[in-house]
Image (tube, helix red, strand yellow):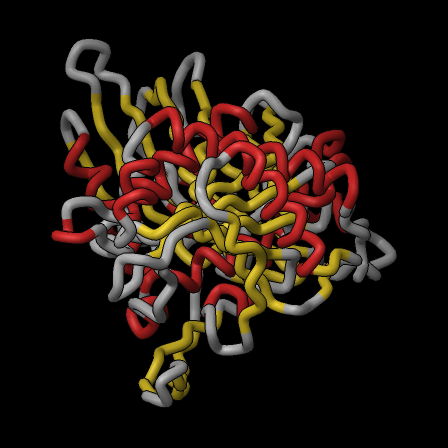
Amino acid sequence: MDKSLLKKAAIQSLALMIAVITFSYAMKQYQIVTVEAINQSGEEVSGSNMIFSEEDFLTSLTINKTDASEGHLTKVQKLIKGADKNILQKLGDNYLVIKKPQGNDLKLQLEDLYINKSIQLTIAGISEDKLTSDMVSRVRGEDLYTGEPNFTETTSTEVDEDGNSEEVVIKDYGNDISHGITITASQDFTTKLYTDKVLIELDTIYAYIIYEDADYYYIDLKKPSEVYDKILVIDAGHGGKDAGALSKNDTYYEKNINLSILLDLKKLLDKENIKVYYTRTQDDTVYLRPRVELADAVDCDYFISIHCNANVVSYPNGTEILYYDNNFKGVKTQDLAKLFSEEIGKTVALKKRGIIKKNQKDIFIMDKATVPMILIEVGYLTNNNDMNYLNKYENRKNVAQGIYNGIMRAYQELPVKDGQ
Ligand SMILES: [Zn+2]
């Protein structure tokens, strides 16, 4: 069941989820020492810890590639003092440069929070807690930014599927890759060392390649398709405060069944050489817009959404594969739906209701998707037989196996073509 739930809330989802993540992170910390995300606050920052000298200290700077006397890399090197030219040469058009804080044997960990278009860097082993957003630089082509990202605000009127309009504030970050930097630090009482978490909101989803030298971390921002041969987006419908369809007497929630199937599918896909983005892997509230934005941003080969159905009456039962009659990346979505209907039919002992063509405006994520996509309605929670079947773990595992078989066959028989 994929009613147009939570449409309006989806508009503000990104900012809210970032806030929730930041807050829940802070709650988990052993000891919160500082929370800072401001650079123009007049705080004292010693010169040696800054990437830029006082006269260079600008939030935005254009590097002129055509300048004959100084090359692009030389300029970046001059602005980011001591940056390693060999590493800079390896980087693409978009990258981050992060000045290492003081400390011996620093450890960097990058967590890809792709559903929020963010990364979280964890830097452990810091001896002096001086990391600020001034130490995070972004290079996009000829533009270089450092410190807290600046934006201009405009309002726009957004109309949802029911025709309701709403004023939406749009923040324009210009060419800046980052749309927000939040730094949280915690200290270990025993070692006295700090661990800093640097949450960097980005303009889109990238694949990340990390380099480092004595002074900096360099994070090359690539298109996922430049790094991975095969890319999937798998979506467990609903989640968190959105339960989805309910069984009779409201005993079972669709969101939990979808997630259970997804987690078994994940076990199978973990063994494959496929980059898989999951819209959620736990009971999170994820709005519809970020789900489809993920699929489009990573330009996945196939976008597969897992759902269960419900009806006001109890007799409808069985598995349906929903699709829009379109063609992306050389894949006719109808063919993809047929293939999955066959494969799931082989492993799942529920009635085969076949493929069902939906029309524009029926399904929000299908309206917005620009990649081959299907939505699987595994069974009807309002039907006793289907519900009993889906309530058994072994059966949900069979569903996962059927989806997995469908994916493998799709790569063989319906391969995507780039640039279509
Ligand atoms: Zn659903």
Q: Say which of 268 and 57 sits in front.
A: 268
Q: Position of residue 164 (x, y in %)?
A: 32, 88
Q: Residue furthest right?
A: 68
Instruction: Report the number of numbered marks.
Output: 0
Residue appearing at x 45%, y 56% in the figure: 291
Q: Say which of 142 and 371 sits in front.
A: 371
Judge left or right: residue 394 versus residue 366: left
Q: Is residue 417 visible?
A: yes
Q: Is residue 41 visible?
A: no
Residue appearing at x 62%, y 28% in the figure: 211
Residue appearing at x 30%, y 63% in the figure: 311
Q: Position of residue 229 (x, y in %)?
A: 73, 37
Q: Position of residue 47 (x, y in %)?
A: 42, 40
Q: Say which of 16 and 102 sits in front.
A: 16
User: From the viewer's perspective, is residue 174 above or below residue 149?
Assistant: below
Find residue 148 and report its image quarter: bottom left
Residue appearing at x 49%, y 77% in the figure: 361
Q: Position of residue 343 (x, y in %)?
A: 61, 39
Question: Could you tell me which quadrant the C terminus lies in?
Answer: bottom right
User: From the viewer's perspective, is residue 193 above or below residue 397?
Assistant: above
Q: Residue furthest top?
A: 190
User: From the viewer's perspective, is residue 263 above or below residue 118?
Assistant: above
Q: Say which of 263 and 216 sits in front.
A: 263
Question: Could you tell me which quadrant the N terminus lies in?
Answer: bottom left
Q: Residue furthest front?
A: 315
User: From the viewer's perspective, is residue 9 above or below residue 307?
Assistant: below
Judge left or right: residue 244 versus residue 338: left
